[in-house]
């Protein structure tokens, strides 16, 4: 991994992203869903046209895995507590009801970014403004603007394309800190016999989240470095020109955690999510889908997702469904 910034001061996000495109105002001053606006009825039908066999795949990781769920350090995975089961009825705590039905109940406490999730466009910001120029003070207590709710209300349906970067590089899983950019993605697409096209929902497999369940946790989280997309001005311009709507990866951050050149942490969250309105879907399970795509040579499909309707949420859990 290149570490060119070592010893140099880390620039402010503003300096790094100076002069790069923004989509603020493109869909009106009240817009809260950003590039999802590109997903009109014609785009839904383009996704439907890529359905060939009817095979379906779900992309959420399990919540409450015995190993603990993979999360950004400082967060915790979902914790589920059973508060009613057969035992309550055996000891009389569960009340008899007419007809004598009994039931189990659970409570769950979780970070909204603590499983496979959609980030709200207002999730990350710099310079006191979130997506579309809304004042970052509107995030106080809950997101009053660009929360996950408008994204959840509309849902996400369109043509998805999976790029298996790990397979393209002949690996089961990319290395910690291993990076790639838009040129690598296009080259991998060509090798897969497909093409990334305008308004696609872009899914990228690194093998990273799948490897979480096989590795020691200490090793997985050490230095918190993931493989992933790396920042460049050209990459941001490419996303803008391609009008890509949604970035979906099997990593926690959707990008290599810190830009190896400058040391800036998660610049693509700011350049793509805050400035262009590209929605981010993180911690997805892509291994089974990728295996199937490699087997039948079909890397494009109908992608659908409906994050939970969390009022004011900075994100929401989701179980996307792919139909091939
Ligand atoms: C942060 O919240 C900082 O990152 P993510 O969007 O990856 O959860």
Image: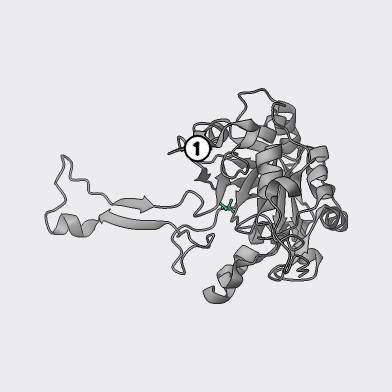
Can residue 299 be seen here? The reply is yes
| Residue 202, percent from left and from top | 73, 47
Identity of the residue furthest to the left in this view: 92
Describe the element under mark 1 as helix, strand or loop: helix
| Residue 254, percent from left and from top | 66, 54
Can residue 300 be seen here? The reply is no
Q: Quadrant of the N terminus?
A: bottom right
Nearer to us in this view, 247 or 129: 129
| Residue 32, percent from left and from top | 60, 30
Q: Residues within 10 Å of mark 1 (few under 14, many from 20)?
A: many
Tell me where residue 160 sits by quadrant. Answer: top right
Nearer to us in this view, 110 or 55: 110
| Residue 25, percent from left and from top | 69, 26
As drawn, 205 above or below 118: below
Q: Read off the residue under disc 1.
A: 139
Color scheme of the displayed model: one colour
The residue at the point 50 percent across, 37 percent down is 139
The residue at the point 71 percent across, 38 percent down is 276
Nearer to us in this view, 250 or 253: 253
As drawn, 305 above or below 203: above
């Amino acid at each position: 991994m290149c570490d060119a910034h070592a010893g140099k001061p880390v620039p402010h996000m503003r300096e790094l992203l100076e002069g790069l495109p923004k989509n603020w105002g493109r869909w009106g001053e009240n817009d809260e869903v950003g590039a999802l606006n590109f997903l009109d009825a014609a785009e839904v039908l383009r996704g439907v046209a890529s359905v060939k066999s009817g095979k379906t795949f779900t992309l959420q990781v399990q919540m409450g895995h015995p190993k603990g769920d993979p999360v950004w350090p400082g967060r915790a995975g979902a914790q589920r507590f059973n508060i009613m089961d057969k035992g309550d009825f055996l000891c009389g705590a569960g009340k008899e009801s007419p007809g004598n039905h009994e039931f189990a109940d659970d409570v769950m406490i979780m970070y909204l970014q603590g499983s496979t999730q959609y980030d709200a466009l207002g999730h990350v910001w710099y310079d006191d403004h979130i997506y579309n120029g809304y004042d970052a003070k509107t995030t106080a207590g809950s997101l009053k603007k660009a929360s996950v709710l408008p994204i959840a209300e509309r849902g996400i349906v369109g043509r998805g394309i999976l790029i298996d970067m790990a397979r393209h590089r002949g690996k089961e899983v990319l290395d910690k800190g291993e990076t790639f950019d838009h040129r690598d993605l296009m080259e991998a697409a060509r090798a897969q016999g497909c093409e990334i096209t305008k308004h696609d929902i872009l899914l990228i497999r690194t093998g990273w989240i799948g490897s979480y369940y096989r590795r020691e946790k200490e090793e997985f989280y050490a230095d918190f470095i993931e493989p992933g997309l790396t920042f460049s001005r050209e990459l941001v311009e490419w996303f803008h020109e391609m009008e890509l709507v949604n970035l979906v990866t099997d990593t926690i951050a959707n990008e290599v955690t810190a830009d190896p050149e400058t040391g800036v942490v998660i610049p693509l969250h700011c350049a793509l999510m805050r400035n262009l309105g590209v929605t981010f879907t993180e911690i997805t399970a892509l291994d089974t889908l990728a295996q199937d795509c490699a087997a039948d040579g079909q890397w494009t499909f109908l992608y659908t997702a409906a994050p939970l309707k969390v009022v004011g949420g900075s994100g929401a859990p989701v179980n996307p469904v792919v139909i091939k």
